[in-house]
Amino acid sequence: MKGDVDLLVEQGFIVFPTGENNIIKAEHAFFGARAITWIRDRATDPKFDLQSYLVALTYYKLGMADLKFEEDELLYRYRGTSLGGVDGEFSKDNPEIIGGYHRPCEQPPRTQDPSDDL
């Protein structure tokens, strides 16, 4: 089995400089290492949905989701994407975060729609 650092480098959580650039990019590496260790500890359980946690980890690495630990549980919240560029050039997801934190293998909690109060 690969070590955590090797896995983080291989999966793009740590990017070493090339050329004249001397900055190592690792903004998601520390939490990613903690999440990888947590996932590895549970991966042998047949009831554990490994695929959904790996997808959540990938979205976190790409900046499309937030992850957090709560009561020894890894929770996930999708944030969407922001493609950037010239205004109107690309479509963007709603900048507001929709839904709360939940297990990646479950449906997100429903957020209350303001029209429900009418």
Image (cartoon, grey):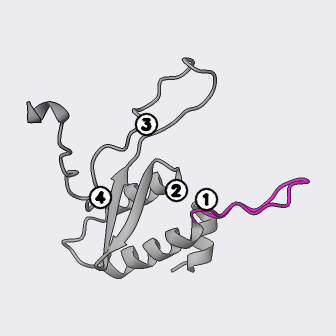
**Which mark, residue 28?**
none
**Of helix, strand and loop, which one carries label 3?**
loop
Label 1, label 3: how many angstroms apart (C-alpha)? 25 Å
Label 4, label 1: how many angstroms apart (C-alpha)? 24 Å
Q: How dense is the environment of label 2, judged by Cα within 10 Å: few (below 14), some, or many (20 and up)?
A: many
Kindly identify the amino acid type of the residue bearing the numbered disc 3: Pro
Per the rendered image, the range of residues in magenta is: 12-28
Residue at the spot 57% in from the left edge and 61% down from the top edge? 11
Q: Nearer the viewer, mark 4 or mark 1?
A: 4
Residue under label 4: 101
Of marks 4 and 2, which one's residue comes earlier in the chain?
2
Kindly identify the amino acid type of the residue bearing the numbered disc 1: Gly
Q: Quadrant of residue 76?
A: bottom left
Q: How dense is the environment of label 4, judged by Cα within 10 Å: few (below 14), some, or many (20 and up)?
A: some
Label 2, label 1: how many angstroms apart (C-alpha)? 8 Å
Residue at the spot 42% in from the left edge and 41% down from the top edge? 80
Label 3, label 2: how many angstroms apart (C-alpha)? 18 Å
Residue under label 1: 12
Residue under label 2: 61
Asked if labels 3 and 1 touch by Cβ distance under 8 angstroms, the answer is: no
Q: Residue furthest right?
A: 20
Q: Quadrant of residue 29?
A: bottom right
Of marks 1 and 3, which one's residue comes earlier in the chain?
1
